């Protein structure tokens, strides 16, 4: 059996993985990786691939794709585990459209430099979150390792993912739908309970972060530390369309938390109820609708990171 399982999502990055796989595999070969590559064939396929190959004995995994690919790999690790999840080591060569998970860890987008990070093998244990949500009347759940977005974020992700599924995409796709969705979205009165603390207000958007980034570099949870056992919740209260547009820069420079209509909270257990259903995305994947329950699983995923994270946490 090979040492590494490499989970390749050919469609990630609007097909960029498929175009670049020859180069990536050549670099893995030249750096001496002993690996078996498996290719996903559709949504959620990586979950089953990872779970099956762990049962076969694989303990080291590389995700080649975007944030959604990493999300599926992690869900495969948690799916009916045959051993503790922290016995599995996960690394990433990021080739998506958002590439937000790697930003927190300062992992380069350059393929050879990213493989250098994998080769050096510096590891840490990061948190995972569980989110329970609904599809119609059926409750289901998903693990995530970067960030979940609710309300306006969920709508923007839904439109962005629909375009990506049709083969349309570019680095500004998320920003395009962020601006365009303003004219159809309506804020909703929500009750947010964080470790027993209750906030009730008219809500525009909520981000629940383990990592710091989403939406292709937006810092909606700029103070998040992925190994502190806490969710960083950024709650944006109802805003006018023009106030949202004027505040877009705050999403990128991390100053959104200073806005007078923004509230930040920390917690391990969160429940969110809304008067009307709102949408959810987690790690960029569109999932379902409210009500939501979030639960922290601290330091439960062993990940390969850049030893020079450069971010102070």
Image: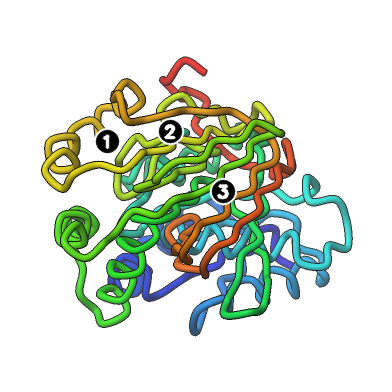
- Tell me the distance, in whole angstroms, between the alpha carbons under discs 1 and 2: 9 Å
Of all residues, the one furthest to the top in this rendering is 312
**Earlier sequence position, callout 2 versus callout 3:** 3
Q: Which mark is residue 221?
A: 2
Residue 190: % across, % down: 49, 49
Looking at the picture, tell me which residue is in the foreground, 147 or 202. Answer: 202
Which residue in the structure is indicated by mark 3?
91
Percent across and percent down for residue 267 are 64, 32
Residue 155 lies, in percent from the top left, at: 34, 63
The quadrant of the picture occupied by the N terminus is bottom right
Q: Is residue 232 above or below residue 55?
A: above
284 with respect to 313 (left or right): left
Q: 188 or 11, which lies in front?
A: 188
Q: CA distance from mark 2 to mark 3?
A: 22 Å
* Circle 2 or circle 3, nearest the eye: 2
Asked which quadrant contains residue 73, the reply is bottom right
Crowd rating for badge 2 (residues with CA inside 10 Å; few <14, some 14–19, many 20+): many
Q: Is residue 179 left or right of residue 277?
A: left
């Amino acid at each position: 059996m090979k040492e590494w399982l490499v989970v390749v999502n050919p469609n990630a990055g609007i097909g960029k993985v498929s175009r670049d796989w020859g180069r990536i595999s050549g670099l893995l070969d030249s750096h001496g990786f002993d690996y078996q590559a498996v290719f996903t064939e559709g949504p959620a396929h990586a979950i089953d691939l990872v779970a099956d190959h762990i049962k076969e004995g694989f303990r080291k995994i590389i995700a080649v794709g975007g944030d959604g690919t990493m999300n599926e790999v992690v869900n495969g690790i948690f799916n009916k585990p045959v051993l503790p999840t922290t016995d599995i080591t996960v690394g990433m060569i990021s080739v998506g459209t958002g590439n937000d998970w790697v930003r927190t860890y300062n992992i380069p987008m350059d393929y050879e430099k990213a493989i250098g990070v994998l080769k050096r093998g510096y590891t840490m244990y990061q948190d995972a979150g569980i989110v329970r949500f609904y599809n119609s009347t059926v409750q289901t759940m998903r693990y995530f390792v970067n960030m979940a977005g609710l309300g306006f974020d969920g709508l923007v992700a839904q439109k962005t993912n629909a375009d990506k599924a049709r083969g349309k995409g570019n680095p500004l796709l998320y920003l395009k739908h962020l601006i365009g969705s303003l004219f159809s979205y309506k804020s909703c009165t929500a009750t947010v309970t964080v470790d027993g603390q209750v906030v009730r207000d008219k809500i525009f958007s909520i981000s629940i972060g383990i990592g710091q980034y989403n939406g292709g570099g937006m810092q909606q949870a700029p103070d998040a530390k992925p190994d502190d056992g806490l969710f960083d919740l950024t709650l944006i209260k109802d805003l006018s369309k023009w106030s949202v547009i004027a505040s877009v820069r705050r999403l990128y420079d991390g100053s959104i938390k200073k806005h007078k209509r923004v509230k930040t909270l920390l917690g391990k257990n969160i429940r969110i109820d809304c008067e009307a259903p709102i949408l959810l995305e987690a790690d960029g994947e569109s999932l379902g609708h409210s009500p939501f329950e979030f639960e922290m699983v601290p330091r439960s995923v062993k990940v390969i990171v850049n030893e020079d994270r450069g971010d102070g946490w």
